[in-house]
Image: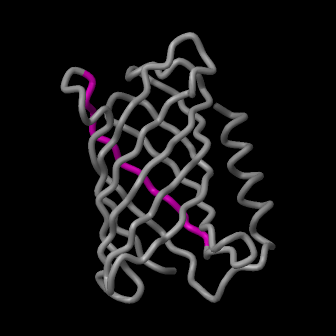
Amino acid sequence: MKKQLIFAGMLAVAISPLSFADHNHSLAFSAGAFEAFDSDQRATEIGIEYRFAPIESVFNLIPTIGLNMNDDGAYWASAGVRYDYGVGTNWILTPNFAFVGYEDGAGLDLGLGLEFRTGLDLAYRLTDSSRLALGIYHMSNADLADDNPGSESVILTYSFDL
């Protein structure tokens, strides 16, 4: 787990001097269900994510770093990217991808400390600087380990510009 946290920190330092668009960075708080579609394994999940401003020179991708945990004792750190796609005046569809360092605690063993997370959020812009989103994501090790059960989460996220 230490290696994954170091990786996330190094990524944050590496992307900080890049040319960012004239947008604010933002902070997001999330809560929801880990293993949302398996009632035997379901756990409450909470998280925090720092979202950098979009990088104009890289297709306006939004770099992110985050920390999550669930009430089964699992915790994970992530480093990834998001892309906002406007679908109306106040609606935003956001596909996202992240590398994840995962520690299962007393919860679900995902087979490896390195996981990959892919997801999709649908957000409603509350104000010019805040939004509320409903998201779903899948986390797995992409068959890099013998055991790859994967996990799906459904989360509600509130984010605001800093």
**Residue at image point 39% right, 89% down:** 128
Q: Is residue 66 left or right of residue 37?
A: right
Q: Is residue 76 left or right of residue 125?
A: right
**Taking 7 as reference, is 66 above or below it?**
below
**Taking 92 as reference, is 81 above or below it?**
above
Q: Quadrant of the N terminus?
A: top right
**Taking 82 as reference, is 18 above or below it?**
below
Q: Is residue 107 left or right of residue 111?
A: left
Q: Give the color scheme: rainbow, by chain, secondary structure or one colour.
A: one colour
Question: Magenta segment: does it hold 43?
Answer: yes
**Residue at image point 51% right, 42% down:** 117
Work out whether residue 157 or residue 83 is closer to the camera in this orientation and state it: 83
Give the percent coordinates (x, y) of residue 134. Answer: 29, 59
Q: Quadrant of residue 142?
A: top right
Question: Magenta segment: does it hold 105?
Answer: no
**Residue at image point 29% right, 57% down:** 156
The span picked out in magenta is 41-52
**Residue at image point 51% right, 48% down:** 67
